[in-house]
Amino acid sequence: MSQQHTLREPASFSGIGLHSGNKVSMTFLPAPAGTGVRFRRVDLDGRPEVEARVENVSETNRSTTIAKGNVRIHTVEHVLAAFAGMGVDNAIVELDSNEPPIADGSSREYVRMIHQSGVVAQTEVREPFKIVTPIELNSGETSMTLFPHDKFKITCTSADRKGRFTQFYSVELSQETWERDIAHARTFCFYEEIEFLIKNGLIKGGSLENAVVIREDAVLTNEPLRYAEEFVRHKILDIIGDLSLIGRPILGHVIAIKPSHTANTELAKQVVAQIKKPLQQAQTFAPPPLAAKEPETLVKDGAVLDIMQVMKILPHRPPFLMVDRVTKIEGSKVIAMKQVTMGEPYFAGHFPGHPIMPGVLQLEAMAQVAGILMMRQAENAGKIAYFMSAENVKWRKPVRPGDTLMIEVDMTKSRGKIGKAKGVCTVDGETVSEADVTFMLVDKEA
């Protein structure tokens, strides 16, 4: 096994995004071992980060988009391919817009940045995952198969629906073959696709400076093709970037016919499932720890939870525990209550002589109640529901000491650690606040 690697020092580059057309500055930064690759939006409050993991993939229309809550990063695959090809395991990518600069449409500029920065070994071990069982994926004209192999190899055939420019290429990936045979291959599209892409808000920054256009049998480009099989080599570049979302290198042979970002990321998800399978099997034949099992038992349809049971599920504690009792759990809905007393610490300053429960704490209560539903899954036991954002917020009436706040939450979406819910708080049957809240489950140590 080899060591993990990161960058020696920062390196920066500015340009425009291919699909957004936005001007953007990008900086590669070193990161501690075990970090993986993370994209950081320095143009947003709090400088939020999105991990380059397949669990965070939100869209695959002509490029790969990752997201966490309302934070989105478009067209990440070319940057990720550069890190994977150069053997960089851990890095932070800072952006002041929602998409990396496209440069010339290949990964060449990003490779230059990595050389400029330098790559250094870290003490922690890199652990590639060796494919043990073949994975097959078929969708329309797209076919992808991943076989066991002692190295990382990709064999690919690409063509459009009319069979034009059918190309084949096979490569066993190493830093040498990556830089020499794949990294310079540019993105491309067919002329008849351009109108559709523009109407759908894509390729706003596209030009012959950063893409090759195929029109009938002609190739439109501002320089000669860099490889005889440049189109299929770029497809391989995309596969490398998308599969890096697995979070660790793999050893296997990918055979792809007419691949797409959707198929690439679906294959990555199936690899992640294969990685997790031994652990799931072990959990099946071993009794789970009591702490992990108990919340799963408590949180079930028809359950009524008192304060002691609530504290077994939620790690929050007074004065920031906003739930005294859960009165109903049914499917995706949960109803809880909070007895608002004059002893609440915030009443001392909000406001003297006119105590009112802060609206933001009502939002926090919604997020905590929604978090209780997430505890149906044993792997979420003991985690904390962080309130991330709120939309369609309305405060209708003040909440005062002596009121019984009823918190009704209906989960509308749950993906991984991110949840979205519709929350309504009432007092004596009258709505006092409501919002669409987004929250994230994190480990206590985070």
Image (cartoon, helix red, strand yellow):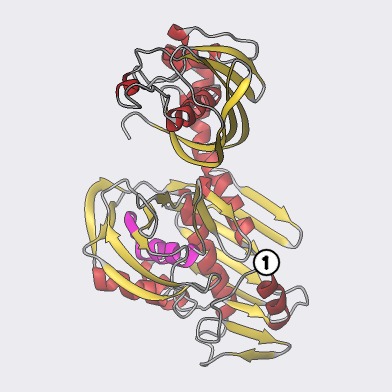
Q: Amino acid at mark 1?
A: Lys
343 on left or right of 242: left
> Which residue is more in the foreground, 292 or 201?
201
Q: Is residue 160 above or below residue 423?
A: below
> Which residue is more in the foreground, 157 or 36?
36
Kindly indicate the quadrant of the structure image that contains residue 316: top left
Farthest front residue in view: 353
Q: Secondary structure at mark 1?
A: loop
Q: Is residue 359 above or below residue 199?
A: above
Q: Which residue is mark 1?
A: 258
Q: Residue at x 34, y 28 (%)?
A: 444
Kindly indicate the quadrant of the structure image that contains residue 133: top right
Q: How many other residues sit within 10 Å of disc 1, few (<14), some (14-19) or many (≥20)?
A: many
Residue 218 horizontal/vertical position (percent)? 68, 91
What residue range appears in magenta?
A: 76-92
Q: Residue at x 51, y 81 (%)?
A: 210
Q: Residue at x 25, y 46 (%)?
A: 124
> Which residue is more in the foreground, 5 or 65?
65
Residue 357 horizontal/vertical position (percent)? 43, 24
Residue 181 horizontal/vertical position (percent)? 46, 76
Q: Is residue 262 magenta?
A: no
> Which residue is more in the foreground, 352 or 154?
352
Q: Is residue 445 above or below residue 155?
A: above
Residue 288 seen in the current view: no
